[in-house]
Amino acid sequence: MTTPTRRHGFRAASAIILLLGGVGVAIATWVGGSHGWAIAAIVAYAVLAGGAYVWAGRSNDVAALVRGGGDERQRGLDRDATAITAIVMSIAAVLGALISIGRTGNPGVYGEFCVIGGITYAVSLFVLQRRRH
Amino acid sequence: MLAHLGKGSLTHFPYGKHTFHMDNRVRELRATHDLSQGQLGDALGVSRQTINAIENGRYLPSLPLAIAIARYFGSTVEQIFVA
């Protein structure tokens, strides 16, 4: 006999975030004068939101995270994936800053990303080491 | 018991100078109690996938979850998770 695993989280969580993001992108694009792209953006985000809602109804690790739920192992997977993403983004920012300095003598926006990343890491360490786990 | 079995799956993990080989009896106890992975997961507040990962040595549960598993089966952590 099998019993469906209890579903944690809120099924529409990621769909709502995607829709809100899509509305933001669409408004910015519309204000920027590209009305066609604005409509395309909201349609694309709506499709993605629909996909996220459907996926969130499944019973697997990714679906649990799409619902904003998940148990300790699934949240660990999310943390690891987030950390890997941050490492790759950091490397991209540093390489971008170096290339930008080589081309223009200025790190540009990549330098700002490096500063934000560095400060965020330092503040996070400071706060997290005081937290009781 | 310490076992120097080298690196590999999560059941072999380094700790200081030693490498532990961690086995567990979750599958055996679950079968004894005639439970599915989903039912045990529901009882413990975790997913079926996590029970599966624990049974197959792909995931070492946190201490609170290990204690919850032990209490659910009326046993101790040391009797279920053997290193």
Image: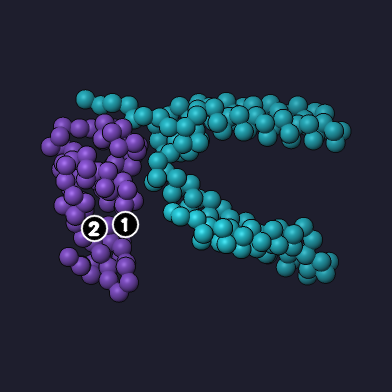
Chain colours: A cyan, B purple
Instruction: Quadrant for the N terminus of chain B, please.
Output: bottom left
* Residue B27 image offset from top left, x and y in percent: 19, 42
Question: Relative to the observer, which residue lies in front, B79 or B4?
Answer: B79
Label 2 crowd (10 A; few <14 / some 14-19 / many >=20): some
Instruction: Quadrant for the C terminus of chain B, please.
Output: bottom left
Furthest residue toward bottom: B17
Does the image show residue B59? no
* Residue B39 image offset from top left, x and y in percent: 26, 31
The chain identifier of the residue carrying mark 2 reads: B
Note whether A105 is above or below A53 in the view shown: below
On screen, residue B4 versus residue B32, left or right, reads: right
Note whether B55 is above or below A45 in the view shown: below
On screen, residue B56 versus residue A25, left or right, reads: left
- Residue that appears at 25% across and 43% down: B69
| Label 1 sits on residue | B10
| Label 2 sits on residue | B22
On screen, residue A131 versus residue B76, left or right, reads: right
* Residue A92 image offset from top left, x and y in percent: 65, 59
Name which quarter of the figure residue B47 lies in: top left
Q: Amino acid at mark 1?
A: Leu
Does the image show residue A42? yes
Label 1 crowd (10 A; few <14 / some 14-19 / many >=20): some
- Residue that appears at 31% across and 57% down: B10
Note whether A8 is above or below B51 in the view shown: above
Tags 1 and 2 touching, CB below 8 Å: yes
Distance in Å between CA atoms under marks 1 and 2: 8 Å
Q: Amino acid at mark 2?
A: Met
Give the mark nearer the N terminus: 1 vs 2. 1
